[in-house]
Amino acid sequence: MTSAAPSIANDPAAAPATKSVVRGIVTILATTLSGYFFLACAWLYWVVAGCGWLIGFVLPRHVIERAPLIWLTAASAAMAAATQTISGFFPDYTSIHDVGLEVLLWLSVGLFARCYIVATDFPATFAGLKQSIEERAVERLISPHLHHPIDAIFTRVWVANTLAVLPLTVLLLLPSTVNYFVVAAYSVALLIGQFPHELVDHINVHTRIFQPKIGSSDRVRRVLRALQFYFEYPHQLMLARAPHYGRIQHVYIHHVEDNGPLDSQTTTPYDRTSFVDFSRHALEQGLDLIAGYKVFPYLAAKGKNRQMRELVRGFLIWYGFLAIVALFNPLAAGVLLVSRFIGGNVFSLISFWQHGLVDPDDVHDVHGNSVDFIGHEHGHMGSDYHVEHHMQPGRHWSAYYEVFTKQTASAEGHRAVLMQKEVFGPLAFVSALWRRDYDAIAAHAHLSGVDESDKATLAAIVAERTRPITGDERSGLALTVDRAVSRVMAVVLPTRFQI
């Protein structure tokens, strides 16, 4: 009697093989999605930068600086108006008239981007920040009523993002006005506003930016409470963000685990020099942004029931908003959902430049798993003093400069890798990671205990700290393909945003 063929369930080699195939499919999908994202971003950057450069001949920066809010308002209105110049959803590319209208659209986007960057620019010093607040009417009005008066500087970001996104959100949501031009302009406005908004949102989850000073009148408290509500709900929804998600993930997971293996944003299992691994990280972050599939299990395991309820409430608001939009404009709902999902790439960029170098000897040591970027005196509102922030996350951002200065002046020096941001910023750092250009990173870095002139030793340390700690490394053909893809994407990635 012949024996039955062995079933897959009883074959010990079947499960790993199936897992490997699934992992390969997911990796290809992730790399494709992130590849398209960065190619699209690069295309948008060069088109917008080129248009902004042309606009600069007739509208120099110093002219915009005289009245940045007025210029930004006018530029936003012009961009919104330009989106409504075609009669159909797409322009007719066989018509010179319609092609000219698209050129006009991109020139208006370039004008907007130029005005936005000037309007949201921050001086490099604390004294400059305070002077800049005094020079802008809205910030000057709000500043005296805040617990931390210097937080009024963030007004320029949320006001600028409102002016940028609100008109386009309305045009996107209305079935009669949405078209390709609206989607394109909304995408640019969303992308250009993401990093400034992330800066303000990060400050807000730790120390509320509209916190009134002690002794404020009831009227002032009501106004600031209304602004806080606007920032945390309507403003977040317009920027494709679910309320509460950022605060819950960042405060109750990231700062608890400090980029360790249990952190939902951890970089430890990934090869930080690999665009393929970056893409896998971005796919996970994108899925978590729309479903919380990593955050919810962590909160449940830790018994954080209150935080789970808040996160559920935030997702209910987000998906309730999408459901209402989908009732009359499914396309707009889809654009908003996709915008949130691809935001995983932005979160992964931040993770890779802040936690791209990890000391394998102590994964949980913030000095060993975080990078500080030194340039602005205040550390770009404290965000570049990332080690100091992890050590004392509850302190106001303006205090980190003093903590950083004391640490660097101490006998042992600063124990984290310090990057010279003014000449080698975060995006240049990520690009160098994908090129495996350890020498370029070391040339612009400093690490206590390593002689300033001994860049070879520092480059070797950098190389060691980019390796996956809890994950596997590629070899053979997979490694060859990975390196080739990573080098291509390193070239694609814009390392500076200048218009």
Image: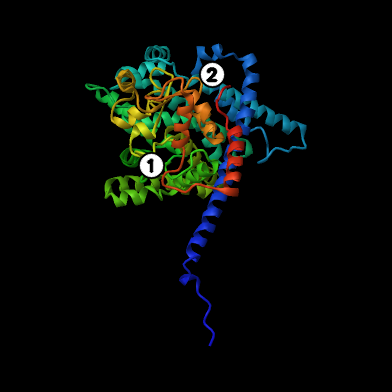
Is disc 2 placed on a helix, strand or loop?
helix
Residue 487, placed above or below residue 154:
below
Residue 253 coordinates in the image, percent (x, y): 33, 42
Between discs 1 and 2, the one toward the N terminus? 2
Residue 239: tell me if it is visible.
no
Q: Residue furthest left?
A: 215
Q: Label 1 to label 2, Cα distance in Å?
A: 33 Å
Residue 13 coordinates in the image, percent (x, y): 49, 65
Disc number for residue 71: 2
Mark 1 surroundings within 10 Å by alpha-carbon count, few (fewer than 14), some (14 through 19), many (20 or more): many
Quadrant where the C terminus is found in the figure: top right
Q: How is the image coloured?
A: rainbow
Is disc 1 placed on a helix, strand or loop?
helix
Disc number for residue 245: 1
Q: Amino acid at mark 2?
A: Trp
| Residue plotted at (40% across, 42% down) | 266
Disc number for residue 53: none
Callout in the foreground (1, 2): 1
Residue 232, placed above or below residue 58:
below
Left or right of 3: which side holds 314?
A: left
Residue 379 coordinates in the image, percent (x, y): 40, 22
Mark 2 surroundings within 10 Å by alpha-carbon count, few (fewer than 14), some (14 through 19), many (20 or more): many
| Residue plotted at (47% across, 30% down) | 195
Q: In the image shown, does 242 or 238 lie closer to the viewer?
A: 242
Residue 289: tell me if it is visible.
yes
| Residue plotted at (54% across, 40% down) | 275
Residue 28, placed above or below residue 489:
below
Q: In the image shown, does 157 or 341 lie closer to the viewer?
A: 341
Q: Amino acid at mark 1?
A: Tyr
Q: Residue furthest bottom?
A: 1
